[in-house]
Amino acid sequence: GVNRVCRGKATDDNAKEYWRLHYGVDSVEACKEKCVGTIGCKGVEYRTEGGRCEVWVRPMGIGVTKEKPGYTCWRYGPAATPAPVTPAPPTEPPPPATKE
């Protein structure tokens, strides 16, 4: 989210092995592209000042976020797609009753 930093399982869980740091990244969109190109990426943390981009690779993902102005934290996941629509079966009149 906006004005949030990414963390592991708790707000103080920010081990350096959780992320790969990139500087000079022009936008959050460019930071997200770095995530897409990184095997095991779980999300990104971005700061506009300095173009600081952390590509998160923690196997358990980003567990929590912590408030910090100037940062954004995004979890990566497949694009949301609407559930397929199953057409209703055609309605047919019941067969005529037969007398036996």
Image (cartoon, rainbow, N blue to C red):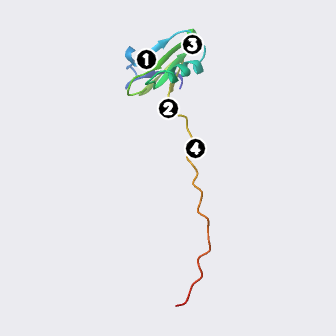
Q: Amino acid at mark 1?
A: Trp
- The residue that mark 4 highlights is 82
Sequence-wise first label, 1 or 4: 1
Q: CA distance from mark 2 to mark 4?
A: 15 Å
- The residue that mark 1 highlights is 19
Query: Observer-nearest residue: 64 or 38?
Result: 38
Locate residue 2 relative to residue 11 in the image: left or right. Answer: right
Label 4 sits on a secondary structure element that is: loop
Label 3 sits on a secondary structure element that is: loop
Sequence-wise first label, 2 or 4: 2
x%, y% of residue 52? Answer: 53, 12
Residue 19 position by quadrant: top left
Label 2 sits on a secondary structure element that is: loop
Other-residue count near label 3 (Cα within 10 Å), few / some / many at <14 / 14–19 / ≥20 = some
Q: Amino acid at mark 2?
A: Gly
Residue 59 position by quadrant: top left
| Residue that appears at 38% across and 16% down | 17
Q: CA distance from mark 3 to mark 4?
A: 32 Å
x%, y% of residue 38? Answer: 47, 21
Sequence-wise first label, 3 or 4: 3
Other-residue count near label 1 (Cα within 10 Å), few / some / many at <14 / 14–19 / ≥20 = many
Residue 79 position by quadrant: top right
- The residue that mark 3 highlights is 25
Q: Amino acid at mark 4?
A: Pro
Q: CA distance from mark 2 to mark 1?
A: 17 Å
Q: CA distance from mark 1 to mark 3?
A: 15 Å
Sequence-wise first label, 2 or 1: 1
- The residue that mark 2 highlights is 77
Label 1 sits on a secondary structure element that is: strand
